Image (cartoon, helix red, strand yellow):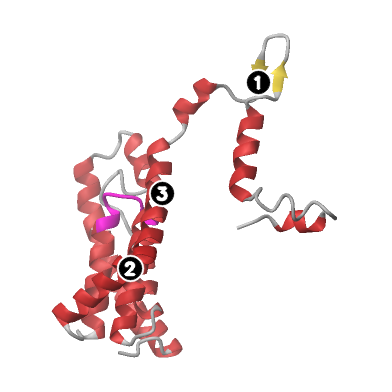
């Protein structure tokens, strides 16, 4: 991926094509450590000590999920998993398959990043849909919605962590309320998907 801005610079676009968005972001980050706020006091916009407040775990989890997603496609593992799924379960009912996917995605996203879960599972679901002769959106759409429905644990999403950080809510309270919300979300996603999305857009073609 290259920055289209370089194509606007006569004579430079070809030579700067390697300078993509990743290097631009990295260059800006480095520049923040070099721009002075108070030159005499040697104070800059950012200090290395500020890196302690960066959520490195989230960044690594997000990057790892994207890398895993790309690896699943490039190595053909996604196709192998999809073929094994079809061989093991045959052609299950579309409703049953969507219910299982929604429940699995909601439980998995309770203990890890929804972005990482989605980037990992979408390639597999696309391959499964291809093996079943179905529209990939039939499986990917409910899965991606379900990945954002995590209410039981503080680690599930940043909003959950903020609520737990107030110390007015215990994990037991979150589990009780979150389980109810998760069940409601399961029913809502399946009902919405079959009652509106699938019927109106005609996505289910098993």
> Residue 31: where, in percent of width, then height?
66, 31
Residue 92: in magenta span? no
The residue under label 1 is: 44
Frontmost residue, 198 versus 74: 74
Helix, strand or loop at disc 2? loop
Q: Magenta residues, as a range?
A: 108-115
Mark 1 or mark 2: whose residue is earlier in sequence: 1
Does residue 175 lie above or below 50 as drawn? below
Q: Residue furthest right?
A: 10
Residue 66, horizontal then vertical, whole percent: 42, 55
Whole-number angstrom distance, CA of label 1 to CA of label 2? 47 Å
C-alpha span from label 3 to label 1: 29 Å
- In the rendering, which numbered label is found on residue 121? none
Q: Which residue is mark 2?
A: 76
Quadrant of the image for the N terminus? bottom right
Asked whether residue 206 is in view, the answer is: yes
Q: Quadrant of residue 38?
A: top right
- At a point 65% along the width and 20% down the height, the residue shown is 44
Q: Is residue 188 visible?
A: no
- Place residue 27 in its image quadrant: top right
Determine crowd level at label 3: few under 14, some 14-19, many 20+ residues with C-alpha closer than 10 A: some
Q: Work out whether mark 3 precedes mark 1 in sequence or the reverse, and give the earlier one.
A: 1
Residue drawn at 34 percent across, 86 percent down: 134
Q: Is residue 163 left or right of residue 152?
A: right
């Amino acid at each position: 991926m290259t920055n289209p801005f370089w194509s606007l610079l006569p004579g430079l676009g070809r030579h700067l094509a390697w300078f993509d968005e990743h290097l631009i972001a990295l260059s800006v980050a480095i520049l923040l450590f070099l721009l002075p706020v108070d030159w005499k006091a040697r104070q800059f916009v950012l200090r290395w000590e500020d890196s302690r407040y960066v959520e490195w775990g989230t960044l690594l989890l997000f990057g790892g999920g994207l890398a895993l997603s790309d690896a699943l496609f490039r190595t053909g593992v996604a196709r192998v998993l999809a073929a094994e799924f079809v061989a093991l379960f045959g052609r299950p009912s579309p409703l049953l398959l969507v219910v299982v996917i929604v429940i699995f995605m909601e439980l998995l996203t309770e203990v890890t990043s929804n972005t990482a879960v989605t980037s990992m599972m979408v390639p597999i679901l696309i391959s499964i849909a291809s093996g079943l002769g179905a529209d990939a959106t039939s499986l990917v759409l409910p899965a991606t919605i379900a990945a954002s429905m995590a209410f039981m644990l503080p680690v599930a999403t940043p909003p959950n962590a903020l609520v737990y950080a107030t110390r007015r809510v215990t994990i037991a309270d979150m589990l009780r309320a979150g389980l109810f919300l998760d069940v409601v979300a399961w029913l809502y996603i399946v009902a919405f998907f079959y009652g509106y999305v699938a019927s109106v857009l005609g996505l289910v073609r098993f």
